[in-house]
Image (tube, coloured by chain):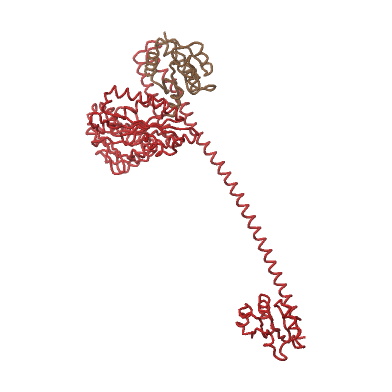
Chain colours: A brown, B red
């Protein structure tokens, strides 16, 4: 089954989303920190990464940028998600190479559909 | 001893002589009996004549017996002096008491003048000091102004950060709650009975409502803080109106209300934020449907001389004249009774108005109780020229700010003469739109494209040198060729490509485009 890496400093949200993804049949690994998440992405090589933008030590844009600029990991689909307000954030997301940008609160069906789409593309 | 009048003859009517004449005028004890000067035009002679003092060019002419006491020689000539000494009458004094008096007097005058000079000097110094102090004060004020400016910029940044932070802080627990409810509702955590399902639905609806409210509030605070996030591009207002009408078609049908769109024959474009205009139309039509039970709702777009006027009219409950101004006030919902559908926030119209005003348009309402309401808004008209210039200038500004190069590419549609078939304006427009899409796809760093008078497509590529733009042009040509082949347009349409780089090849929007089209 496809493996998804979930990176978000909001532990409660991670719990919820993990439950949702596992119910949909995915294997889920998580991290509450950008730096740690980045390392997990490299060591676990997930099939898809979902990463929050606003995190204390290393934000989602940085994580995304670093992974997308590394040929070894750039083809792993990466979804940025955030509760941030500005439209500019979408642009920044595009610039760092994110494959999708989802705002919180999100519709679970929308999220799942997006994940399916991105996994379908990369396989 | 009372002074008797001394009669004096002044020889020499130059500066000194003139001074003596003036001086002695004020002295009662002196009588100038004559002024001598060889030069008739001497200043002193003129003055003497004015004062009715006898003048002559030879001193001997004016000597009267016994009536002369002193002669003062101020000619500076030793010959005259010698002559006077030799020829003067014995009792007449040459350069005596009066001479001394005169010198004393002149010395006094000189002293006064010196003092005046000193005073003037001091005045100037004081003035200079004043100027220096003013300059210092100006410098201080300027520094303070710079400080204040920095503070304001910081406040601005804090405001923007605040809005973002608030958004994040409010939405995160909301996301957690929503997902939590959804997980249970969807049966992921076990079976849910009917009653539980009902309660969960109510809770979810409430969360959604809260979410909309937060979005609206943030929208408003952003617009009011000036961060409206307006991203303008050339949009079709007529198409947008139709889009929104389509969205509400079924709702209108359900209510038995006719929904129609009144548009001019040709499309109407405006330079505006597509999403925001959709938001405005959606809000207006949504409101119209909410408050109309029978009759019709009409969305109209009209091009007037200098604006684009859009209207949403309904035959609904209407609003009293007194309440019309309240319509745009935040949170003011005039009549809380409404049909089904999501509960409003009372912010929609206010936000819509702010959006239109951010576009430099106006929005107002006309309404009559039980007859209906019409909300009208205007958008400024833009010519293709203005749009293109603004677009290119934006790119130039950024290049200047970041000290980088900027290139632009122009793709021009020329109806090919291969088939001698002329393309219609619409066809050209759609070809250009197709090209625009190809551009966006093939050039990942392009800042999107701008259309100019429906014959040209202009692309801005920030941070690019001449070489990189040439290679980009190559890629684009290929992509566009493929596109034309796919659409079977190769024979009908010829495209011309050109590019120019700032600052290497030109420095203004006009020159860049001219240069690009030259090739």
Residue B394 falls in which quadrant of the image? top left
The foreground one among B246 and B459 is: B459
In this picture, residue B436 sits left or right of residue B14: left
Image coords of residue B264 (percent x, y)? 24, 37
Residue B314 in the image: state x and y as whole percent: 26, 36
Look at the image and tell me in which quarter the N terminus of chain B lies: bottom right
Relative side of A23 to B52, left or right: left
B246 on left or right of B119: left
Residue at image point 37% right, 27% down: B439
Residue B346 in sight from this viewpoint: no
**Residue lying at 63% horizontally and 78% vertically, measured from the top left:** B42
Quarter of the figure that contains the C terminus of chain B:
top left
Q: Is A81 displayed left or right of B381 in the figure?
A: right
Relative to B149, say whether A59 is above or below: above
Taking depth in this image into account, of B144 and B279 the one nearest to the observer is B144
Residue lying furthest top: A1
Vertical placement of B16 versus B318: above or below?
below
Which residue is nearer to you in this view: A60 or B392?
A: B392
Residue B299 falls in image quadrant: top left
Q: Is residue B303 above or below residue B279?
A: below
């Amino acid at each position: 089954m496809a493996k998804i890496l979930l990176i978000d400093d909001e532990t409660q949200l991670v719990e919820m989303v993990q439950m949702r993804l596992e119910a949909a049949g995915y294997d889920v690994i998580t991290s509450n920190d950008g730096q740690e998440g980045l390392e997990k992405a490299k060591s676990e090589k997930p099939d898809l990464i979902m990463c929050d933008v606003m995190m204390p030590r290393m934000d989602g844009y940085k994580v995304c940028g670093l992974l997308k600029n590394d040929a070894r990991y750039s083809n792993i689909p990466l979804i940025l998600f955030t509760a941030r307000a500005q439209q500019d954030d979408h642009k920044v997301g595009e610039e760092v190479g994110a494959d999708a940008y989802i705002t919180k609160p999100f519709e679970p069906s929308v999220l799942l559909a997006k994940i399916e789409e991105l996994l379908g593309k990369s396989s | 001893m009372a002074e008797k009048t001394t009669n004096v003859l002044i020889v020499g009517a130059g500066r000194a002589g003139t001074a003596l004449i003036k001086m002695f005028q004020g002295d009662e004890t002196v009588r100038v009996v004559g002024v001598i000067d060889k030069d008739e035009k001497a200043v002193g002679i003129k003055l003497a004549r004015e004062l009715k003092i006898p003048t002559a060019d030879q001193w001997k002419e004016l000597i009267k017996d016994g009536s002369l006491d002193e002669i003062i020689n101020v000619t500076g000539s030793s010959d005259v002096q010698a002559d006077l000494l030799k020829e003067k009458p014995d009792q007449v004094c040459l350069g005596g008491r009066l001479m001394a008096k005169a010198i004393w007097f002149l010395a006094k005058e000189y002293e006064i003048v010196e003092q005046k000079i000193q005073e003037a000097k001091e005045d100037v110094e004081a003035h200079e000091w004043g100027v220096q102090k003013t300059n210092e004060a100006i410098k201080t004020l300027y520094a303070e102004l710079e400080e204040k400016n920095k503070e304001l910029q910081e406040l601005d940044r804090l405001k923007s950060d605040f809005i973002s932070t608030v958004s994040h802080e409010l939405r995160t627990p909301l996301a957690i709650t929503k997902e939590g409810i959804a997980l249970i509702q969807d049966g992921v955590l076990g079976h849910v009975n009917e009653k539980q399902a009902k309660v969960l639905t109510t809770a979810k609806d409430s969360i959604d409502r809260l979410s909309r409210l937060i979005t609206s509030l943030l929208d408003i605070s952003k617009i009011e803080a000036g961060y409206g996030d307006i991203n303008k591009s050339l949009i079709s207002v007529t198409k947008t109106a139709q889009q929104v009408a389509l969205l509400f078609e079924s709702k209108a049908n359900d209510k038995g209300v006719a929904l129609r769109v009144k548009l001019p024959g040709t499309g109407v474009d405006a330079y505006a934020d597509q999403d925001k205009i959709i938001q405005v139309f959606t809000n207006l039509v949504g409101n119209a449907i909410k408050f109309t039970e029978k009759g019709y709702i009409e969305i109209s777009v009209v091009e007037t001389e200098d604006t684009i006027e859009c209207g949403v009219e309904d035959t609904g409950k209407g609003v009293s004249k007194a309440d019309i101004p309240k319509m745009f006030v935040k949170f003011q919902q005039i009549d809380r009774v409404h049909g089904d559908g999501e509960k409003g926030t009372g912010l929609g119209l206010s936000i819509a108005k702010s959006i239109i005003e951010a576009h430099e348009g106006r929005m107002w309402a006309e309404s009559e109780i039980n007859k209906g309401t019409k909300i009208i808004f205007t958008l400024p008209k833009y010519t293709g020229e203005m749009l293109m210039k603004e677009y290119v200038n934006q790119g130039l500004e950024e290049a200047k700010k970041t000290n980088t190069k900027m290139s632009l590419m122009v793709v021009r549609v020329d109806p090919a003469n291969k088939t001698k078939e002329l393309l219609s304006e619409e066809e050209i427009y759609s070809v250009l739109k197709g090209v625009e899409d190809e551009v966006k796809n093939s050039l990942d760093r392009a800042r999107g494209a701008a259309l100019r008078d429906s014959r040209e497509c202009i692309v801005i590529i920030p941070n690019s040198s001449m070489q990189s733009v040439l290679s980009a042009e190559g890629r684009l040509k290929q992509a566009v060729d493929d596109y034309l082949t796919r659409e079977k347009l190769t024979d009908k349409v010829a495209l011309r490509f050109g590019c120019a780089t700032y600052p290497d090849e030109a420095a203004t929007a006009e020159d860049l485009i001219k240069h690009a089209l030259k090739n």
